Image: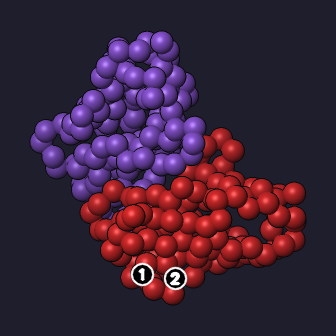
Chain colours: A red, B purple
Amino acid sequence: DTAVSQTPKYLVTQMGNDKSIKCEQNLGHDTMYWYKQDSKKFLKIMFSYNNKELIINETVPNRFSPKSPDKAHLNLHINSLELGDSAVYFCASSLVESPLHFGNGTRLTVT
Amino acid sequence: AQKITQTQPGMFVQEKEAVTLDCTYDTSDPSYGLFWYKQPSSGEMIFLIYQGSYDQQNATEGRYSLNFQKARKSANLVISASQLGDSAMYFCAMREDTGRRALTFGSGTRLQVQP
């Protein structure tokens, strides 16, 4: 199936741990994104890559580090997890003028 | 400053009736796109409809139409003949064609369709 797929779907971990979320798209899109959706459902852009180049880096703690090995993949690594990092993280992809296609989200719970 | 404003946190509609979800936006970019997404309780983000700032006609996709009033900076979503499966969160979003090109989202409207 053509899609944006992210893994894992659920991630439960303790404070202080390091974790990664993986994202892959097979839509041939050249831009990928990470969004964070908080408990009030507000969606905020975190990072955006275009052809492996970082083009958006919002005010995000530097514990969050995106990595794009190629234009079909954009992973998110989070160091020293904090309670406030609990949220749903969405990966998305697009072409320049097209709508964003979202993955199904990763629900991160930090205890 | 808030770029996308959705003033209705929650809406109710009777099945088979039409409903309008409000969205206003703020931009100085002459070229931009407006989007609506649906997020059902299962959590995925589903693209519904797109309107470009230079499009002369209002966008329509099946039961969805976008009431675009450029001078008022509004891009309301109209859902006709509501169905129970339309119950979800609805997000309005904007992309400015110069600069960052990421979507900026509004705070969403939770729509509940009643039988």
For the point 52% across and 76% down, the residue is A74
- Secondary structure of the residue carrying numbered label 1: loop
Q: Is residue B72 visible?
A: no
For the point 45% across and 23% down, the residue is B84
Q: Chain of mark 2?
A: A
- Whether labels 1 and 2 belong to a single chain: the reply is yes
Identify residue type, mark 2.
Ser
For the point 59% across and 73% down, the residue is A22
For the point 39% across and 36% down, the residue is B24
Do the CB atoms of the residues marked 1 and 2 lie less than 8 Å apart?
yes
Is residue A90 toward the left or the right of residue A4 in the image?
right
Tell me where residue B51 appears, x and y as whole percent.
25, 45
Q: Real-space Cα distance between discs 1 and 2?
A: 7 Å
Identify residue type, mark 1.
Lys
Is residue B95 toward the left or the right of residue A104 in the image?
left
For residue B112, above or below residue B96: above
How many neighbours does mark 2 have within 10 angstroms: few (below 14), some (14-19), or many (20 or more)? many
How many neighbours does mark 1 have within 10 angstroms: few (below 14), some (14-19), or many (20 or more)? many
Residue at the disc numbered 1: A71
Residue lying farthest to the bottom in this orientation: A69
For residue A28, above or below residue A36: below
Tell me where residue B107 appears, x and y as whole percent.
54, 40
Residue lying farthest to the left in this orientation: B56
Residue at the disc numbered 2: A68
Looking at this view, is A57 or A43 the one in front? Answer: A43
For residue B34, above or below residue B79: below
